[in-house]
Image (cartoon, rainbow, N blue to C red):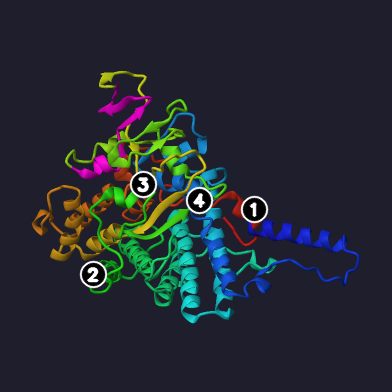
Amino acid sequence: MKAKNIFNLFIFVVILSLSSCSLEEVPYGFYNSGNFFQTEEDAIAGLMYAYVPIPSYRGLSQSFLYANSLSSEEFTLKSDAGSDQHDLDRNQQDGSNNTATRETFLILYLVTGRANTLIEHIPDIKMDENERNHMLGEAYFLRAYGYYNLVRLFGKVPLRLQTLDGFELVGKELSPIQEIYEKSIIPDLIEAENLMDANIRRGRANKVAAQGLLANAYLFLASAKESGLEGYEFVPDAALYYEKAKVEAAKVIHPETSTVFGFDNDYLNIFNVEKETSPELIFYTISSLATVGVKNLASTLTTPYCSEQTFMVPAQHGGFSSYYGWEHMWVEVPFYNTFDDADKRKKAFFCTELTVAGKVHTWDNGTLYVDGVPNSAGYCKRPFATKFLDSNNDGDTGNRYTLVRYSEVLLTYAEACGNSSEGVAALNQIRTRAGLSPYSTSDFANDADYRKAVVQERAWELCFEFQRVYDLRRTKGMEAMAAKYGKTLVKNYYFYEIPQEEYDYNPGLKR
């Protein structure tokens, strides 16, 4: 892909030169990385440009959502969805023609490429030193974020740590998983943590986000080593990385070290896209409702189709009204049924009722009702996800995706601690809020038994938050998941294939 872009730029420059009156004429008005990064305003603009792909139409809003959710037990699809999407649902992804994984690959490389440019140029900009350091830290965070997602989704990928400003830099072979962690993910997040402050900047990363993501990366390394995931043989000792995860997560959850973020007992406050008041929100994307082209497709794809009539969800979900549901991605009912009826998350994270034209449509254990009377024509055909709900969703609305939140880091800490009083206490904060009975250390035979329970708790607490497939992969739990929920496993379910286009345009890549 990179070679194609450079080639197109080359052709453009040649045509421009040939059409000029003189070969010595100096063109004006063209920006490039060499003359753009001059001021603080330039740095901010470049930084925002690096964030843009993450929540985009082809990022978290659609392709990234497919790649991160369909392979798990969270979602299935309507029958006439694209064949490449059904391939993900059946865990038989083919890198040569899968649109979702191809676009996810591209989006993540856009993030890492733009971050490289920022890392190269921000240090030379004359501006307030603290702000410069923080923005440089954000660039390191974004590069780590991109490669951390790439390595968990695709395994070995080309590692590029400089801007592609020449043909000689395009060819790059697949880098070992160890190299990607040791040259980018871990050092970049450590650098980001050191450079950034903990101040809240809407939709941007800070020190606490770096600590939370680093804790997650250490946890992934520990459990991948413990489970025997292919490619993670280089990790010297799982216990060492569990301890590293614990130390980083503690920086986020212990009030004596971090008072900026905290636990929130109000689920609606955490996920209501109209609010940004929850102390749980550490790193999340945000796009203005008025921004042209921004689409909260996660909301559109997962809400019911009501014949283009406006529907309203109950007050417990914000009382939002909408009319643009596509009913494209369906919550897997067997997954919904794993939630205890006493679990408050079952009512908070799923909706089984909506009002259309004054009539109440409900779903109850497979039966559809309209105003309390069984009716197969009801619009609420199954539970649907509420974490992406957006009021007045007309297909061109804002979005917010929570990528690092306090409860996720708390669960990382709980898992890293193992079956200990401090680990169980952290886990019980999550369970108590959900209205479930607390655990004690005596409930588990050993650390492995306990950590299995934490991973299940993560499945419930963090559903639809781009975490589940990663948890299944690091614990090598895909086979158990498939057997439990009747999902299919064909091929490439621990690492997706590199898209064919990368082989076509990257002369250094060999199969």
Q: CA distance from mark 1 to mark 2?
A: 49 Å
List the residue tagged with mark 1. 504
Looking at the picture, which amino acid does disc 3 mark?
Phe
Q: Is residue 168 magenta?
A: no
Q: CA distance from mark 1 to mark 4?
A: 22 Å
The reply to whether residue 178 is in sight is yes
Nearer the camera: disc 1 or disc 4: 4
Residue nearest the viewer, comparing 418 with 497: 418
Q: Is residue 356 magenta?
A: yes
Q: Residue at x 20, y 48 (%)?
A: 434
Q: Residue at x 51, y 35 (%)?
A: 83
For numbered disc 4, what is the local secondary structure?
loop
The span picked out in magenta is: 343-370
Q: Eyeballing the image, is 68 above or below 278?
A: above
Looking at the picture, which amino acid does disc 1 mark?
Asp
- Most extreme residue toward the left, as rendered? 442
Q: Earlier in the sequence, mark 1 or mark 3?
A: 3
The answer to whether marks 4 and 2 mark residues whose Cβ atoms lie closer than 8 Å is no
Q: CA distance from mark 3 to mark 4?
A: 15 Å
| Quarter of the figure with the C terminus | bottom right
Q: Residues within 10 Å of mark 1 (few under 14, many from 20)?
A: few
Percent of width and height locating residue 313 = 34, 35
List the residue tagged with mark 2. 254
Nearer the camera: disc 4 or disc 2: 2
